[in-house]
Image: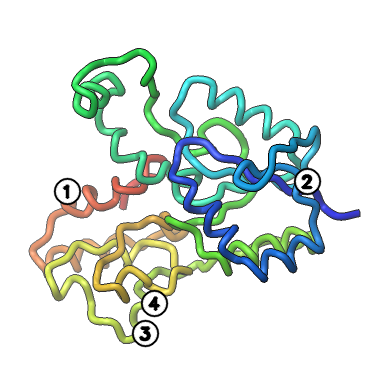
């Protein structure tokens, strides 16, 4: 029997789900091996039981926690899809102030119907089995993780930093241009796409396992940067993990 797969969304831009949809021909091939039972972007049907649930978005609205728990209860495997679900995502930018202050700053009024809570990743509410990091996710990485799950294998993510991909591609170092970069402590797998585009790494894929912070602190000192400057970049996408 084909595995039943569902995609769900909470607070986020739904860019990760659009990345899945944009796989086009590859997605059509995948659909030959799975039964897509829930995906609001494509269908209205629902299912009582799901083998694999991919969940996008952070938890920050009334009712989100209960809905997520219900998805968890009817899913054998739950995968955090993208940075919002995995780390808190861009929504984490509002986590340094109370929801009341944030609503006042954004809307100039504390309107009850716009009530939100401090954004949290899925793991703050339920057990997350696996994750597809990134903002947005990498489509090929999504396919690789889905394939591993369909074969009942352990999905693997790169254990090294974005700096490795950057060096291999021979991109110039962002620090040499006075930019604060999280490449030394951020999990690779994005092929350093932001650096390739002339930017710098903001850590959307989360920290690597056991990041070495001492060399990073030396890099900051060499370029006249402070820990607070690096934390400002880190908070762009991360609300749940301990900062370097």
- Marks 4/2: CA–CA distance: 35 Å
Q: Nearer the viewer, mark 4 or mark 2?
A: 2
Q: Residue at x 52, y 36 (%)?
A: 10
* Residue indicated by mark 4: 164
Q: Are marks 2 and 1 in contact (CB under 8 Å)?
A: no
Q: Secondary structure at mark 4?
A: helix
Rendered view: 54 above or below 23: above
> Relative to residue 100, is residue 218 depicted above or below?
below
Q: Secondary structure at mark 1?
A: helix
Does the CB distance between marks 3 and 4 fall below 8 Å? no
User: Which callout, 4 or 2, points at the residue further toward the start of the chain?
Assistant: 2
| Residue occupying image coordinates x 67% and y 70% | 26
First in residue order: circle 1 vs circle 4 = 4
**Where does residue 231 sit, x and y in percent of width and height?**
23, 49
- Residue that numbered label 1 is attached to: 228
Q: Which mark is residue 169?
A: 3
Residue shown at 59%/43% (left/top)? 55
Q: Which mark is residue 51?
A: 2
Residue farthest right in this picture: 1
């Amino acid at each position: 029997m084909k595995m039943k797969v569902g995609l769900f969304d909470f607070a986020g831009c739904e860019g990760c789900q659009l990345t899945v949809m944009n796989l086009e021909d590859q997605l059509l091939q995948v659909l030959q091996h799975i039964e897509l039972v829930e995906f609001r972007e494509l269908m209205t049907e629902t299912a009582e039981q799901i083998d694999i649930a991919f969940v996008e978005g952070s938890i920050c609205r009334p009712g989100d926690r209960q809905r997520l728990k219900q998805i968890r209860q009817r899913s054998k495997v739950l995968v955090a899809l993208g940075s919002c679900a995995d780390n808190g995502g861009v929504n984490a930018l509002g986590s340094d102030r109370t929801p009341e202050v944030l609503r006042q700053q954004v809307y100039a009024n504390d309107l009850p119907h716009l009530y939100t809570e401090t954004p949290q990743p899925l793991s703050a509410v339920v057990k997350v089995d696996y994750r597809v990091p990134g903002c947005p996710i990498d489509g090929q990485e999504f396919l690789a993780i889905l394939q591993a799950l369909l074969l009942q294998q352990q999905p693997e993510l790169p254990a090294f930093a974005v700096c490795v991909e950057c060096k291999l591609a021979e991109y110039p170092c962002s620090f040499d241009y006075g930019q604060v970069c999280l490449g030394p402590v951020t999990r690779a797998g994005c092929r350093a796409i932001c650096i390739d585009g002339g930017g710098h790494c903001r850590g959307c894929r989360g920290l690597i396992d056991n990041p070495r912070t001492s060399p990073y602190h030396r890099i900051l000192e060499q370029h006249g940067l402070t820990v607070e400057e690096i934390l400002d970049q880190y908070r762009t996408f991360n609300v749940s993990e301990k900062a370097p």
